[in-house]
Image (tube, helix red, strand yellow):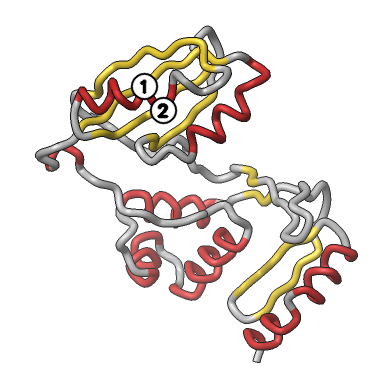
Amino acid sequence: MPLTLDKTDSAIIQSLMKDGRKSLRQIAREIGVSTPTVESRFKRMVNTGFIKKIVPVFDTDKVEVGMSALLFLQVLAPKIPDVAKHLSEVEEVRNVFTASGENNMILRVTLDNPESLDTLIRRKISVIDGVKSVSSQLITRAVKDEQNLVVKSGLAVNLTCNYCSGEIPKDPKTLRFGEYERYFCCSSCLTLYKEKYKGRIKALSA
């Protein structure tokens, strides 16, 4: 069963996307709600896995050395999952996207110089089983670099079970302890989770 974001949820996220350094109190003043409301909503979005992490966004124009590029790959369809997993573990690869069309995988990579790009393609990408061809374009300037998701009221977020990792198709079973909230697809998964982590749950609930 999807979690539906409301106006308050979307306002919190949009505020954080503008500046992730803001305190919860600053966000509360900005969007016109109480600080406890912002705190509870933020924790809920973290607990459901919708907010995975908050990371710094760098201004690459201020870096003297370094470059970014987009790589366009043709990958054999049956090999796409394996290729994507392999590429996700390559340090220089910052984003991996599957796409429609002839170039069915797109990468954003960061490197020191054009020679490093050539080496990356020859030694780490084109040699992967299933990769048919690779073409590249250097990024000369980032004019706009935002999250690839437009967050607004009514956005549905799918929930997955915190024990079996399966999708939750209906009303989730919920476990709250300390500042945490966990969601389960059935009573069995809830019971198994409580048994597996009973020590931690007891400690955090004290």
Q: Give the quarter of the image for residue 189.
A: bottom right
| Tag count | 2
Compared to 53, does 58 lie above or below? above
* Relative horizontal placement of residue 96, taking residue 112 as reference (left or right): right
Please name the amino acid that badge 1 sits on.
Answer: Ile
Compared to 167, does 148 lie above or below? above
Rendered location of residue 179, percent (x, y): 59, 77
Q: Residues within 10 Å of mark 2 (few under 14, many from 20)?
A: some
Please name the amino acid that badge 2 sits on.
Answer: Lys
Query: In percent of the image, x 44 and y 73: which residue is there?
Result: 35
Rendered location of residue 75, percent (x, y): 55, 15
User: Residue beneath label 2, please?
Assistant: 124
Instruction: Tell me if label 1 and label 2 are in contact, CB under 8 Å.
Output: yes
Query: In percent of the image, x 9 and y 39: which residue is there?
Result: 64
User: Residue beneath label 1, please?
Assistant: 121
* Relative horizontal placement of residue 171, taking residue 97 as reference (left or right): right
